Image: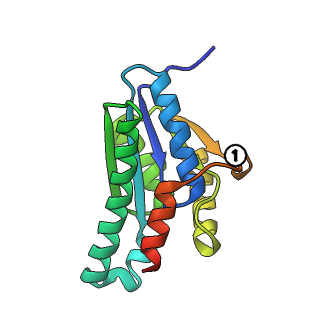
């Protein structure tokens, strides 16, 4: 028996794994007629209070994060979805994603990667996915690294990471 989902949230961070989670979320939304897809990225409050407390630096980071979310929204629309919404928030990612957005939008499915970017960010994303599983009132699908096909090209994530390096 397949569940019917009407409001799907996918967490993105510019990593290949997040893009694979996005690809899966789009496929699920397409199978659920009239489903709404919410694409969210959360700027971690602990990062925002460090070097990003400078308004210029924070605004630049926010702008790049919004561009990332908008790129995913455009890709979802190109895939055939019509109800696509981008969300960029600042806060504690596991709380914003598992509670705030889920409650505010009435989300019934959250899709996320089991880890995100490398190094310290990977550690943070891992704890984010764990927090989502633990605290979200909705169903949660965690996309594991091992499920990504070897030939999968994460075009949006690649472009985002190249721009980050500039």
* Residue 7 can be seen in this image: yes
Q: Crowding near pointer 1: few (<14 within 10 Å), some, many (20+)?
A: few
Judge by depth and name the residue closer to the eye, 124 or 66: 66
**Coordinates of residue 30 in the picture (x, y in percent):** 46, 26
Judge by depth and name the residue closer to the eye, 33 or 163: 163
Q: Is residue 42 above or below residue 118?
A: above
- Single out the residue that lies furthest toward the right: 146
Q: Which residue is mark 1?
A: 149
Judge by depth and name the residue closer to the eye, 128 or 20: 20
Q: Is residue 64 above or below residue 73?
A: below
Decide if residue 83 is on the left or right side of residue 154. Answer: left
At 68% from the left edge and 47% from the top edge, which residue is drawn? 148
> Number of numbered discs present?
1
- Single out the residue that lies furthest toward the top: 1
Decide if residue 143 is on the left or right side of residue 85. Answer: right
**Coordinates of residue 102 in the picture (x, y in percent):** 42, 41
Under tag 1, what secondary structure? Answer: loop
**Coordinates of residue 25 in the picture (x, y in percent):** 51, 37
At 32% from the left edge and 82% from the top edge, which residue is drawn? 53
* Residue 137 can be seen in this image: no
Q: Is residue 20 above or below residue 65?
A: above
Q: Is residue 53 above or below residue 79?
A: below
Q: Quadrant of the C terminus?
A: bottom left
At 74% from the left edge and 49% from the top edge, which residue is drawn? 146
Q: Quadrant of the N terminus?
A: top right
The image's colour scheme reads rainbow
Judge by depth and name the residue closer to the eye, 161 or 108: 161
């Amino acid at each position: 028996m397949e569940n019917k989902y009407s409001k799907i949230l996918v967490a993105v961070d510019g990593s290949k794994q997040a893009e694979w989670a996005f690809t899966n979320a789009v496929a699920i939304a397409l199978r659920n007629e009239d489903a709404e897809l919410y694409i969210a990225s959360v700027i971690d409050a602990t990062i925002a209070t460090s070097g990003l407390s400078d308004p210029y630096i924070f605004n630049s980071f926010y702008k790049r994060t919004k561009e990332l979310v908008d790129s995913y929204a455009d890709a979802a629309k190109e895939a055939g979805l019509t109800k696509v919404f981008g969300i960029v928030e600042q806060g504690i990612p596991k709380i914003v994603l598992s509670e705030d957005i889920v409650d505010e939008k009435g989300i019934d499915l959250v899709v996320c990667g089991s880890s995100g970017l490398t190094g310290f960010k990977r550690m943070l994303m891992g704890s984010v996915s764990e927090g989502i599983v633990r605290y979200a009132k909705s169903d949660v699908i965690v996309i594991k690294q091992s499920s990504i096909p070897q030939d999968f090209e994460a075009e949006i994530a690649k472009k985002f990471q190249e721009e980050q390096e500039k």
